[in-house]
Every structure is written in structure tokens, then in C-alpha cells.
Image (tube, rainbow, N blue to C red):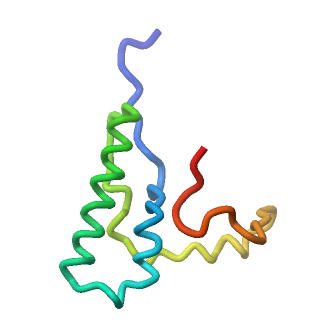
């Protein structure tokens, strides 16, 4: 067995919490300080989850990138999109 631990981290963007997903769709309703607080809280949540999972290398989860567009999935072959997602905001929870 290798004496060196395997360094682990997340791959790609960490999913937005449901409340941030909702807020992103209504950013015009928030002031600059509100948006900064939303992003900071989302980063804290992402870092907390990664630390709790025992990851060695953590990131901000790209929680400050509020304009990422996932519409390109519809153009990929072999991916079937759900007609009606079970959640409207945030990732599914097991």
C-alpha cells in the first residue's frame, strides 16, 4: 500500500444550493451588498461540505460564477433530459 495519501478534490463546479439558484434568476431584485452576501454564503456552504467530506484540496466551488449556462447539454448526443425535473432549484438530495 502506498504511504502517500491520495489527494482528493471536487471536479468541476460545485452545485448551487437551491436558494442561490433561485436568487440568480432574480439578481435584479438584489443590491450589490446582497449579491456579495449570497456568493459568500454559497462559498461557505461549499467549503463546509468539502471539509465535512474529508477532501484534501477544497475550492470555492465556483459559487461566484452566477452566469454559467448549462443549455449545451441539450446538444449532446446520448443524454436524455428530464421532461419535468423533480426539483426546481438546486441539486437533488439522496
Q: Residue 47 at what x, y percent from top left?
A: 31, 48
Q: How many marks?
A: 0
User: In this orientation, which residue lies closer to the viewer: 82 or 67?
Assistant: 82
Q: Residue at x 30, y 57 (%)?
A: 43
Q: Quadrant of residue 28?
A: bottom left
Q: Residue at x 21, y 83 (%)?
A: 32
Q: Residue 24 at what x, y percent from top left?
A: 42, 78
Residue 27 placement, left or right of 81? left
Question: In the current view of this chain or complex, which residue is farthest to the top?
Answer: 1
Q: Classify 1 as above or below 35.
A: above
Q: Classify 80 as above or below 58.
A: below
Q: Quadrant of the C terminus?
A: top right
Residue 23 placement, left or right of 76? left
Q: Residue 38 at what x, y percent from top left?
A: 29, 69
Q: Residue at x 44, y 46 (%)?
A: 10
Residue 52 placement, left or right of 85? left
Q: Classify 11 as above or below 32.
A: above
Question: In the current view of this chain or complex, which residue is farthest to the bottom?
Answer: 28
Q: Residue at x 31, y 44 (%)?
A: 48
Q: Classify 36 as above or below 80.
A: below
Amino acid at each position: 500500500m502506498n504511504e502517500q495519501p491520495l489527494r482528493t478534490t471536487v471536479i468541476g463546479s460545485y452545485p448551487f444550493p437551491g436558494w442561490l439558484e433561485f436568487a440568480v434568476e432574480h439578481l435584479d431584485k438584489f443590491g450589490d451588498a446582497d449579491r456579495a452576501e449570497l456568493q459568500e454564503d454559497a462559498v461557505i456552504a461549499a467549503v463546509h461540505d468539502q471539509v465535512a467530506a474529508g477532501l484534501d484540496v477544497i475550492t470555492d466551488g465556483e459559487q461566484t460564477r452566477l452566469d454559467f449556462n448549462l443549455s449545451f447539454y441539450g446538444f449532446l448526443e446520448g443524454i436524455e433530459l428530464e421532461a419535468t425535473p423533480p426539483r426546481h432549484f438546486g441539486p437533488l438530495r439522496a
